[in-house]
Amino acid sequence: MTTPYTAPLKGNYTLKNVLLETGYVSDERGIKATKTELFCIKVNAGTITKIFPNDPKLATAVDAKGYLMLPAFRDMHVHLDKTLYGLPWQAQSPKKRTVLEMIAYEQEIIPELLQTSTTRAEQLIDLLQRYGTTFARTHFNVDTTSGLRSLENLQKALDSRKESFSAELVAFPQHGFFYTDSAPLMKDVAQMDHVAYIGGVDPYGIDKNIEKVLDYTVKLALDNNKGIDIHLHDGGKEGIHTIEYLAEQALQNPKLQGRTFVSHAFVLAQLPLAEVERIAEKLATAKVGIVSSIPFGDLVMPIPTLLKHGVEVLVGNDNVQDYWSTFGPGNMLAKANLMAEIYGWRSEFDLSRTLRFATHNTLPLDDKGNMQWPKTNDSAEFVLIDASCSAEAVSRVSPTMALAHTGALYWKK
């Protein structure tokens, strides 16, 4: 595969015929439409420096063709380092594997996959960009089979795409901290400046000791000024205890608040509403967020309840095509669309709000319909979408026509 975009326009330029949302249209029944207008937008050195009334005759301006400008999309949970994307198609094995069985399987195949992991990571980045994503929070394996080679190969891929794509890195002990003695490797990688988060997976299901794993994770994070992002598939009382214990650690250590996340947290989909609300209140107080890949099997995560109680909810593709799952589309608008369908967010207002899950909580309008993005001095990080408004973009999964990363503007080929 080749990059889906043309060579970028950089430096100082002006766009004309840019469609921006300016408010809502309401009647006695509530919000029924979104107001939009055409504008000119000046970009200089990666920053939006001026937004002014549209001048379609401005000869020096680049024509945005009436496309809708939205914040660029951000994938907040993906594994760029171990995709099968780029290899011949292969569906998931019909044999259902436990996490421990999958660890054994990974130990078999990782040495071969590492030989081409940089190229496949580049191809997966290109796929994400095709759908308007310019940023990802990506996990990378740290384990006794691969050592730090997953990170090394991933970093090469990120370096090759650094002008159009950026990422924050999560050190991910997929094979457990202690189950495969990955703790020393995690200690080494935690000291690296370009690693932002300490990851983890199923402290009970893999390492059989919730407190030992989380205490070690918290210490690594505090000692090295990192955030925390734990994969949690464990259900039952062990899953609940893991979430609550991590929330308690954040309450005791304010430096972790707003920087601590539980990815998946499927146990929340298995609980009565009253129990979910109790845990949601605790998460909100501790400023511990939930990261979801939406959906997962027949589980319906209680996202509306979490939002109601003020829990930060992030969304990512997780698997795009790998040996864990083949269903991730690589398209954050498609993820938002799926969420809207699952939770019944059908109105103009609700659909426009759902866009937040594709953009990491940045929206053109606030809840009252006031313009809040873009503004002068904002980073020029945006997409141009073939849609009349964000509600339509979410509902129809409208195509991305162009994207800008730190001001560099790329048009779809």
Image: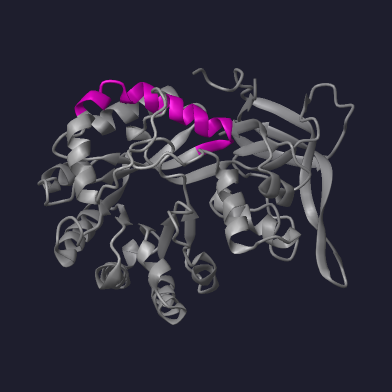
Residue 260, above or below 9: below
Residue 113 belongs to magenta span: yes
Residue 374, can we see it? Answer: no
- Asked whether 73 or 99 is in front, the reply is 99
Which residue is rendered at x = 12% and y = 50% of the image?
Answer: 179
Along the line of sight, which residue is nearer the eye, 90 or 333?
90
Relative side of 125 to 105, left or right: right
Q: In this view, does 320 lie to the left or right of 255?
A: right
**Residue at screen point 67% across, 35% down:** 399
Q: Which residue is farthest front?
A: 94
Report the front residue among 343 and 188.
343
Where residue 278 sits: x, y (%)?
A: 41, 80
> Relative to 370, is 96 on the left or the right?
left
In percent of width and height, residue 73 lies at 56, 42
- Left or right of 10 in this view: 84: left
Q: Give the range drawn in magenta.
A: 111-134
The relative height of residue 59 versus residue 73 in the rendered view (above or below) is above
Which quadrant would residue 286 be assigned to in this image?
bottom left
Q: Main secondary structure of the magenta part?
A: helix
Give the residue displayed 17% in from the left and 67% down from the top. 211
Residue drawn at x 37%, y 39% as measured from the top left: 79
Q: How is the image coloured?
A: one colour
**Quarter-wise, where is residue 215 in the image?**
bottom left
Task: Based on the picture, tell me whether residue 180 belongs to the magenta stretch.
Answer: no
Q: Position of residue 284 (x, y in %)?
A: 44, 72
Q: Can residue 258 be seen in this view?
A: yes
Residue 402 screen position, x and y as percent? 66, 30
Quadrant where the C terminus is found in the figure: top right
